[in-house]
Amino acid sequence: MFDIDFSYTLFIVAGGAALLGAISGIIGSLAMLKKNSLLADAVSHASLPGIVLAFMLTGSRTHSVLIIGAAIAGCFAASNMFLLVKKGHLKKDSSLSLMLSMYFGLGMVLLSYIQYKPNTAPAGIETFLFGQAATMLVSDIQVIAVIGGIILFLLIVFWKELLLVAFDSEYAAGTGLPVTKLELLFLFMLVGSVIIGLQTVGVVLMSALLVTPAAAARQWTNNIVVMMLLASFFGALSGVIGSVASSFIPNLPTGPAIIVCISLIALLSFFLAPCRGIIPNYLRRKNKLIYADAHAVLDTLYILAGQDGGEKGHERAHIRSMFPIKNDVDAMLAELKEKGLATEISPAHWSITPLGRSVAERSGHIIDMSGKALHD
Amino acid sequence: MINAQLEIILIACITAICCSIPGVLLVLRRMTLLGDAISHSVLLGIIIGFFIVNTIDSPILVLSAGIVGLLTVVLVEILAGTKLIKIDAAIGVIYPFLFSVAVILISLFSVQVHVDTDAVLMGELAFAPLNRLEINGVDYGAMSAYQIGGVMLLNIILCFIFYKELKLAIFDPNYAATSGFKPKTVLYGMMLMVSITVVVAFEVAGSIMVVALLVGPAIMASYFTKRLWAMFFLAPIAGVIATLLGYWASHLLTVSIAGSITTTIGLLFMFIFIFAPKTGMIAKAYQRHTMRAEFSVNMLLVHLWQHEVIGDAREENMKGTISTHFNWNGEFTELVLNSAIVRGFLQVSDDNTVQLLPEGREQACRAMEG
């Protein structure tokens, strides 16, 4: 009996976390394109006073009531920041930091106000700071699904416009799109995706669920749709892994577990992603260098062959002497031999093959004796 | 012995001064979010330090927290340096990761550690004077006052000594590099300074108030001056004013001190944002308004003069034609005409013709010359 119940709870929590990760992956990708990654950070911190105020006004601890408060506060903060950057001479980062701390400070004030009052223990509200997925109910998943559905619907309806504003807002303004309104619409979508995560990962870490999957997905593709799908897959995957891990390891908090998981995925992506990753990039660069060096040796062989026909081959020491700063000429020769571009006619005597000759001619590096490029 | 309340106020004020000085550098260098990141990730350093020495009040903790703070900056710089993601996204990836690891460590070993995760965010200024500095049984005051005061002095001295280097590295790193300064080194030194500041301030104020104290006073100062040295003076003053007001409000309403100070910083900023002379919203709107009126008057004078020169002033220089030619509504036309009449540039006769006066011609001439 216990067993079934346990796995049912786990199923709910993992499902909710996966749904959450999927939605935030998509919105996070768009936020990242707009270089607005940390806006989510400010918005999620700013939702605290809304949560506390909703509790103070209604006395209810119901998830849906509290996140309505969070949504209102989040929208306020977001439009506030928008206004500050547009109207003041404030830079984006300063206005984010300031709004983040101001709204969160207000939340702290309100929280301490109800704490000091008798008979209104705000139990359950503090879980919003770091999240508590274990208390997730089916109704909470429904809330996530409904808000997530609205966000996705808006995304599909305004897809073209949002994308244009994200990629080139000046051009979008030039074509007559209401850029300010679209930016505000996106802000509110971002607020929506932040508030549905507050219960699971909490105010402090919610921004990471938006930023990190997108950062990981960005490494694998240059296509925005693929990036969104991949980010939402990464988000969902870490949601599942994080919640399962926290149910098996006692005292492991779900929110931080999810964030650590997605961070590791991002770390792997930074290192391994085929087209942008650090390791593939390093290997490619190295290969390119070897390739360039080997071709320099090939060019030398070609020129030497042009001087004396090259039937007897050329002494290795002679070739080596033409590259005073490189000591791996032997390796280059071996590489050329492997590719069939050069042969070792007799011991320590090398010559270019017909294939090597055509490759050298095609490369366009070779200048013949009259000083004219053979190929241009 | 000073009484506890006064001591709390003193500690809060020292913290405000201590944070607002490196805050100026962060705001100008547009790196305030790094301050935010450090103020969260130092928690990991404190936990690691705790695992090493097994006590919560040891200088080792400050050291390890400082190292993790600097590590945050280095990691962000490396990640942003690979050009894989932008710097803001790099910050958004790194600090939640370090913070999550810290929270997980706290939760898994919560039996031994009495670190409250809420207190990490909110700080407990009210408890700041509890830890006393006692030498030979004589009470010399709160420990944290000495710690933060020391860092404050250090910050002031460093900014004084390296003023030129900091200024160059902040405003024109490329020029600094070509003239033989090392802007990268200065920047890392600066971030070390921020790290140490955040670590000591974090213990009493909590990460959110530290962010507010780093950013708020510096931004407020930037509304009154464009000079770096003046910002170094004004920012601490703004910080102290906000702290005093915030403490007073928290006392009045019996709410969280750190929260109240943070909110006050925000509100004070809002006030300055709206009412600041020259740079505030109202002042700017007023400037725009007067500029528009001034421009319109000049345009009108040149227009009238033009028609006088061509010789069709009798038909063209009428009140009605002016508003159609400039596409002004009647109200605005009246406004511009009145403003020009008051300044003695023109007169309107009874049959609604507008005539330039000599002064008006001169002004039109000046406007044409620009």
Image (cartoon, rainbow, N blue to C red):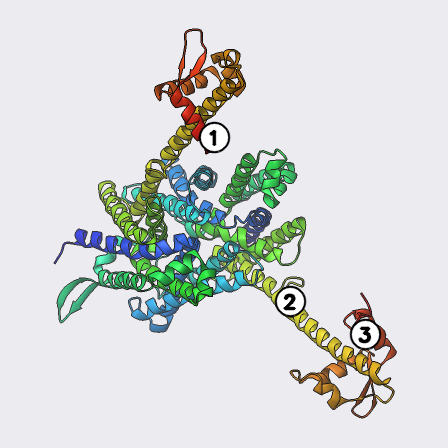
Q: Is residue B138 left or right of residue B281?
A: left
Disc 3: which residue: A370
Nearer to us of marks 1 and 3 is 1
Identified by mark 1, the residue type is Met
Q: Are marks 1 and 2 in contact (CB under 8 Å)?
A: no
Q: Looking at the rendering, which quadrant does residue A328 occupy?
A: bottom right
Q: Which residue is mark 2?
A: A281
Looking at the image, the residue that sits furthest to the top is: B351
Q: Chain of mark 1?
A: B
Mark 3, other Cα within 10 Å: few <14 / some 14–19 / many ≥20: few
Please state which of residues A116 and B61 is positioned toward the viewer in this rendering.
B61
Give the image quarter of residue B148.
bottom left
Q: Which residue is mark 1?
A: B368
Q: Residue at x 82, y 81 (%)?
A: A342
**Element at badge 3?**
loop
Looking at the image, can residue B140 be seen?
yes
Q: Amino acid at mark 2?
A: Asn
Q: Chain letter of disc 3?
A: A
**Both marks 1 and 2 on one chain:** no
- Label 2 and label 3 in one chain: yes
Residue shown at the point (49%, 14%) measured from the top left: B317
Could you give the CA–CA distance between mark 1 and mark 3, rounded to whole angstroms? 66 Å
Relative vertical location of residue A308 with respect to residue A361 in this rendering, above or below: below
**Residue A293, percent from left and from top:** 71, 77
How far apart are the alpha carbons under marks 1 and 2? Answer: 61 Å
Task: Name, please, the residue furthest toward the bottom.
Answer: A347
Q: Answer yes or no: are tags 1 and 3 on the same subunit.
A: no
Residue placed most toward the observer, A303 or A144: A303
Q: Nearer the viewer, mark 2 or mark 3?
A: 3
Chain name for mark 2: A
Whether label 2 touches label 3, CB < 8 Å: no
> What kind of residue is marked 3?
Ser
